[in-house]
Image (cartoon, grey):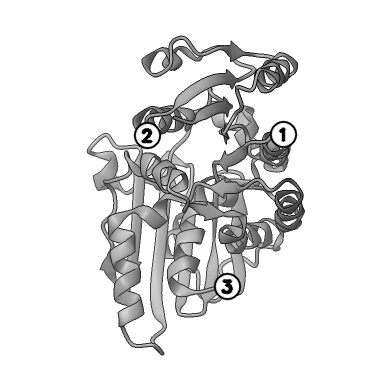
Amino acid sequence: MKNFALVGVGGYIAVRHLKAIKETGNNLIASLDPNDSVGIIDSYFPDSPFFVEFERFDRHIEKLRRKKEDIDFVSICSPNYLHDAHIRFALRVGADAICEKPLVLNPWNVDALGEIERETGRKIYNILQLRLHPSIIELKRKIEEGPKDKIYDIDLSYITSRGKWYFISWKGDVHKSGGIATNIGVHFFDMLSWIFGPVKENIVHVMEPNKASGFLGLKRARVKWYLSLDYNDIPDDIRGKGQRTYRSITIDDKEIEFSGGFTDLHTKSYQDILDGKGFGIYDSKEAIDTVYNIRNNKPIGLKGEYHAMCKNIK
């Protein structure tokens, strides 16, 4: 049994980490969040100490270390801009880090973390769960077994509607979240470059607080992408079903179905890490480069090869 601490236990994604720690037969010995709406802990580790102040959390971890009750892993579910600092904390207390995506906001932070890995002898893992999805694994296999010189045409559409709260929270602050492409798109960009190769061309057509769109030229694919938080972007037939999320990826006009099968991917990620596998920091570097460049590229407007949904922007 391994000992885990969790930073950001009040966040949306933290429950998947709690579940993964529990289902892999391990123990949560401390968690931290400045917000105290964390009753979900009771469903997994009701006796685990919880802290709202980092200083007390840090002191508790140090006390455990002095008693030889070491932390094996620190799971990090905090806001994006804090990932780097919390990863460094994990390695300083002698633990490996398991961090939600995006690992960091800037490409140079990856190399800095690599130096700390080497100095401490600890390991940093990134959750890249789409790489573990059965449909995505099968797609990668088909592409690898297909014609080596073929360039695929891909349309990516992801609309996950959010209320006004989103833009008041840290998620709506581009300096803290990295903006929409980083916050909701990074795992798709990671998946596409994992399958179709590195980015050769990166063009942004639209960049607004609640939506973004552009074109990626990958080694083996041409990708038109559209990301949105706007409920009005959801197709009428999907809205008619009462759904607030729409996800679509087509490859050469053929829909790739992977809407289900997500619930256990964090547990699978944790098991891989515990088995000595898992994805390290340089596995995520290509996607971090991609979203950093999207964030810093100047939009060119509706020119060239742009996503069809851009025509609906008013």
Please tell me which of labels 1 and 3 falls first in the chain: 1
Q: Secondary structure at mark 3?
A: strand
Q: Earlier in the sequence, mark 3 or mark 2?
A: 2
Which residue lies at the image location 62% right of the left edge and 48% below the top edge?
Answer: 123
- Image-quadrant location for residue 170: top right
Identify the element where label 1 is drawn. Answer: helix
Which residue is tagged 3?
A: 199
Badge 3 density bin: few <14, some 14–19, many ≥20, Cα 10 Å: many
Q: Please, is residue 14 above or below residue 306 in the view?
A: above
Q: Residues within 10 Å of mark 2 (few under 14, many from 20)?
A: some
Residue in the foreground of this view, choosing between 56 and 225: 56
Q: Nearer the viewer, mark 3 or mark 2?
A: 2
Provide the residue designation for mark 2: 24
Residue type beneath disc 3:
Val
- Report the disc number at residue 89: 1
Find residue 304 and report its horizontal and vertical position in percent.
54, 76
| 3D distance between C-alphas at marks 1 and 3 | 32 Å
Tell me which numbered mark, 1 or 2, is placed earlier along the sequence.
2
Neighbor class of circle 1 (other Cα within 10 Å; few <14, some 14-19, many 20+) is some
Residue 250 in view (yes/no): yes
Left or right of 46: which side holds 107?
A: right
Most extreme residue toward the top, as rendered? 47
Q: Quadrant of the N terminus?
A: top left
